[in-house]
Image (cartoon, helix red, strand yellow):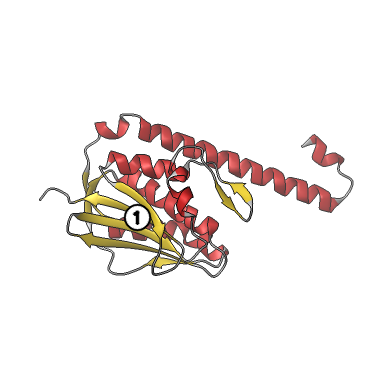
Amino acid sequence: MRNLRRLPEQTERESALLALEQGVDRATRLIEQLLSLARQDSEQMHRHEARLLELGELSRTGIAELAAQAARQSIDLGLHGPAKGRVLGHEEALQILLRNLLENAIKYCPPGATVDVSVLQRPDGIEWVVEDSGPGIATDDRTRLMRRFHRGQHGGAITGSGLGLAIVQAIAERHDAELQLARSARLGGLRASVRFPLPPS
């Protein structure tokens, strides 16, 4: 802050202040993600009873929470299809999983892109999907980006903390589910899906 006051021009001070604010935002987000990862690594989740959750309801809640952020970037964020399906799980963890997938999609998509959430019924389980019309991820990078602290590239620059998809992977594993990254046949960008086993009848 002392150095900011010494800058001679107002525009220089504003530019430096913006960079400072962005740095604080990045640090805050990193701390939040580290805490989320620590919670998934602990046995805390196993001490609480899992319950049947409707993924359609969780999808609508997650979309509503990020609607303003998507609108600021001119991203069309919404549900695709009926989005109905129940899984046995932990609500807070699944909310974090969806939020990370949606934030990644919004962050890396250009203005005017589409980000959709869908819930698909499969013979062997339920698939929760976030897909977009953005640039996608190269095939060789998909497995690497699910490891901790491996960061992606956007516009030629290394971005992110490398924890978002690692957290998704950790939560999926705690639910006996599988995270898969592929090209979206419908929208052309990334298709991130989490496949859950069928809940007990």
Q: Position of residue 56 (x, y in %)?
A: 29, 60
In the image, is 94 to the left or to the right of 125?
right
Residue 86 picture quarter: bottom left
In the image, is 116 to the left or to the right of 87?
right
Instruction: Count the marks.
Output: 1
- Using the image as rendered, state which of residue 140 and residue 127 is in the foreground: 140
- In the image, what residue occupies the spot 21% across and 38% down? 49
* 76 w.r.t. 124: above or below: below
Can you name the residue that lies furthest to the left here? 201
Can you name the residue that lies furthest to the top here? 43
- Using the image as rendered, state which of residue 188 and residue 87 is in the foreground: 188
Q: Position of residue 153 (x, y in %)?
A: 58, 50
Q: Dot 1 surroundings within 10 Å: few (below 14), some, or many (20 or more)?
A: many
Q: Position of residue 48 (x, y in %)?
A: 25, 35
Please name the amino acid that badge 1 sits on: Ser
- Using the image as rendered, state which of residue 25 and residue 75 is in the foreground: 75
* 114 w.r.t. 167: above or below: below
Mark 1, residue position: 193
- In the image, what residue occupies the spot 28% across and 43% down? 90
- The quarter in which the N terminus is drawn is top right
User: Judging from the image, what secondary structure is the residue with disc 1 in?
Assistant: strand
Q: Position of residue 21 (x, y in %)?
A: 67, 45
Can you name the residue that lies furthest to the front here? 140
In the image, is 118 to the left or to the right of 76?
left
- Using the image as rendered, state which of residue 15 and residue 111 is in the foreground: 111
- In the image, what residue occupies the spot 48% across and 39% down? 33
